[in-house]
Image: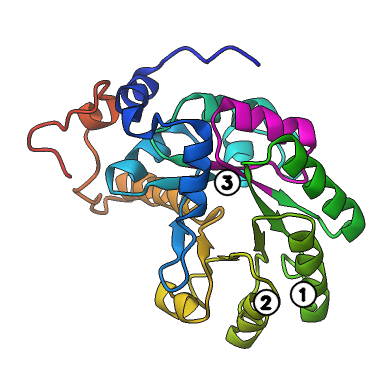
Amino acid sequence: MPPVPPASTGVAWLRATVGRFSMGSGARMSGFAALHRTGEPLVLPNVWDVASARFLVEVGFAALGTTSLGVAATNGLPDGARATGAETLALVLAALPAHLTVDIETGSVATAVAVAEAGAVGVNVEDAMGPAAEHAALIRSVKREAPGLFVNARTDTHWQRNGDLAEAVSRIRRYADAGADGVFVPGLAEPADIAAVVAAVDVPVNILFLPDRHTVAALAELGVRRISTGSLLFRAALAAVVDTATAVRDGRTVRPDLPSYARVNVGSGERVAGDVP
């Protein structure tokens, strides 16, 4: 395993508060699995660095995922090209004070084992519409080598594609049979399609939140047990950067409730007096 990255202020804060998640790895992994509840789905924000993780933990999120696009773009690397393994592993090694599940893209057994040993409780592994039999074999191998790791098996039938519900159902059933702990169909939007996917498998179904199509309440009613934000938060952060910079340039008002320098730079976890909560 690579060495733990040097502790920046943010990492020091995270390590100082990680005690409440210091139980054994088996207990942590089973605790994460228990968060996937019918009627009360796990809302899983996806982070790209220590700062985004810390601020989400502060507002009460006990579980986080990584966004492969966010990690890749932050480091000037392409998404979906297995180019961010070191950067993702470094984020796991930061010992975030939350359950962390990692997007390892198409993945490998070695990568899944590495992030499990580093402290991750789960992985998201996508089929990229390759042969379903090969993806099922990967899932079986990962579960054999890291049996407690929560494997969220993603199929891309509806991701940047028109979508084929029958193909999606066929693939997720195959992945569940191979030992996947959950299945993920990003891009699925129609309520009837979501209900059909939920009915097709006994394991938790993960849906990617689409702001113009979904609400948490509606997805919960459909039986969805995990709702991811994917790259949404990262893209929203980029939009906020542009909006703030152009507001300064164009003489518009900058929102007044930004986190202070002291709060972002805090190294011990204490709140700064008078700062925005």
Cβ–Cβ below 8 Å for labels 1 and 2? yes
Label 3 vs label 1: CA separation? Answer: 25 Å
Residue placed under numbered mark 2 in the picture: 197
* Residue 117: in magenta span: yes
Residue placed under numbered mark 3 in the picture: 67
Label 2 vs label 3: CA separation? Answer: 23 Å
Disc 1 residue crowd, few under 14, some 14–19, many 20+, Cα 10 Å? many
Q: Amino acid at mark 2?
A: Val
Does 150 sit above or below residue 261? below
Q: Amino acid at mark 3?
A: Thr
Cβ–Cβ below 8 Å for labels 2 and 3? no
Q: Which residues are magenta?
A: 100-124
* Disc 3 versus disc 1: nearer the observer: 1
Residue at the extreme left: 274
* Side of 166 relative to 119 (left or right): right
Disc 2 residue crowd, few under 14, some 14–19, many 20+, Cα 10 Å? many
| Residue 239 percent coordinates (x, y) | 45, 53
Rendered image: mark on residue 169: 1
* Side of 105 relative to 226 (left or right): right
Task: Decide which of tag 2 and tag 3 comes sooner along the chain.
Answer: 3
